[in-house]
Image (tube, rainbow, N blue to C red):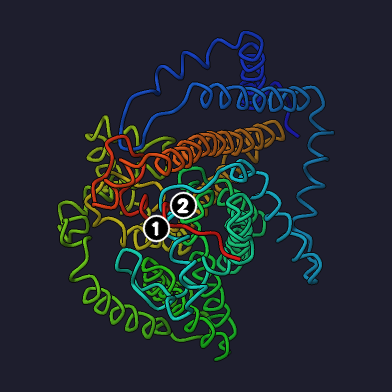
Amino acid sequence: MSDPKRDLLGIVLLGLPVLGGCLGAALLIADAMPVFLASRFGGASPYGTLFHEDMASAVRLFSVFCVLCGVCAGLSLIFPERMWKFGERIREWITSPRRNKRHVMGFALLLILFAAITYSGAFRIGFHSDDFAWLDSTAKTVQNPAHIFSRSQSHFFRPLTFLYHTINYSLFRGNPHLQHISGIVFHGLAGFFVFLIVVKLSGRRILAGLAALLFCAYPVSSRSVMWISGSEIVFAGLIYLLAFYLFLLYLEQKKPAYYAASFVLFVLGLMAKEAVISLAAAVFLAGFLFPKKASRWSGLPFVIIGVAFLLVQMSIQSDSFLLDDNIYVLNPDLMIQNYGGYAFASVIPLGHRILYFHPVLKGLSLVALAVCVPLALIFGGNLFRFLVLWHIVLLAPFVAFNLPVQPRYLYLPSLALSILLALTLGTLWTKVFALSHYRQLALAAGFCLLVASALVQIHTAAVKMRFESIRMNAYIQDVKSDPQKMRAIKDGRLPADSPLTLDHLKAALKLEPLP
């Protein structure tokens, strides 16, 4: 370890978490900031508002994390060698050369447990928005399995999604709290496949572990995991990752069985979520940048099927509300602006809200991308180039929406973004912080605070969704006891005070418990 007198930067960096811990302790004692922050985040927008209890709970939770991190940083300043040896033991466990099934399954279970703790607030959320329409559809599917192949949900043909919701409903008998189990478990498994994919692409298990943790704690698209209806993108994302991992195995070993399995999963993924089409571009890029034993053109059949699927979808959606109401518009100017908006919202907490009040930030984001992306493609290695291009193609299916930025669309793009962030932290570790134990311990403390801030954001979203679901379910019960509102809804008129759309309200009112 370097001489402390020659490593003032490391000491200063470790001092920052200590200072943050002191401030966190002061906030916990005074408890004055929550009300102040709640007043600043109360503005109305298409995303609703944050509750005072919401912000208060978030600030308290983050203050606790700051105090814990400050204590660890203080111990690192006082006992750097002991703290470093403790970190080395953790690193040795992660990088252990053992490859047995028990070790691999243990890490998978660890990620599932981490996802369950991160999203524990979801178990208190009841049915919400689209859930009522899906419950109605799954009830019909239980009575008539052929309903799986219908287009009753927004004109989309998603038989695998219908099957997923039907099985989820049948397993938990319509209990909204237990139905969250599937989405959370699938999210943890998706994190595990992120780990496996990064290991295949880079051979670096520490980098893969960081990427998996960051993906599991990615806060922007938290509704995709905590929302029963939104968990279909988690289900599709797991298929996406499994198909991509098998393709990477094919590139490495050139076994036709891996290629066939990857191709079949790609087709099944398209039957779950249209956005899985971006996998065609991902495998094509991987074939060129990481060819190994297989042909560079191995991904071409995926591209052909993807183009065919796109043409079929355009035919299916030709008479849907998405095109009739100009919700999905293939306008180059709109798509470029949306790319800047989604890129901004991907990395900035509450970025979608900030963009609503300050849309000029979309343009600034585009300028930053116009500078950073070419530099990354010119000077970055193959892995960095692939991740940048992968993130672009992952965003592509969503940039044509003529809507305010929707954070739930960022679940699939977070696959590439979490690995990019982990790669950036890894580069900082080797290039800047490897000079002393002090700096490395400071970076570890910074990583812990980054994950902690993500957990706080997810907790905040969970509290907000819980209040929303309580309000929606209470409104449904009130409507059932109000003959005038019931008559208006039957006539196709939505009450002015309804928190639900007319279709969702109708679906909720005609739900009947299944045996």
Dot 1 alpha-carbon crowd within 10 angstroms: few under 14, some 14 to 19, many 20 or more? many
Q: Name the residue under label 1.
A: 391
Q: Estimate the x, y position of residue 243 in percent, counting from the top left.
A: 52, 75
Q: In this view, does 406 lie to the left or right of 177?
A: left
Disc 2 on helix, strand or loop? Answer: helix
Find the residue positioned furthest to the bottom.
256
Quadrant of the image containing the C terminus: bottom right
Question: Residue at 39% of width from left, 81% of height from top?
Answer: 302
Question: Residue at 48% of width from left, 79% of height from top?
Answer: 145
Asked whether 340 or 163 is in front, the reply is 163
Labelled pair 2, 1 in contact (Cβ < 8 Å): yes
Q: Name the residue under label 2.
A: 417
Q: Residue type at mark 1?
A: His
Question: Which comes sooner in the sequence, label 2 or label 1?
Answer: 1
Asked whether 236 or 323 is in front, the reply is 323
**Rounded to the nearest whole Å, what is the CA distance between mark 2 and mark 1?**
7 Å
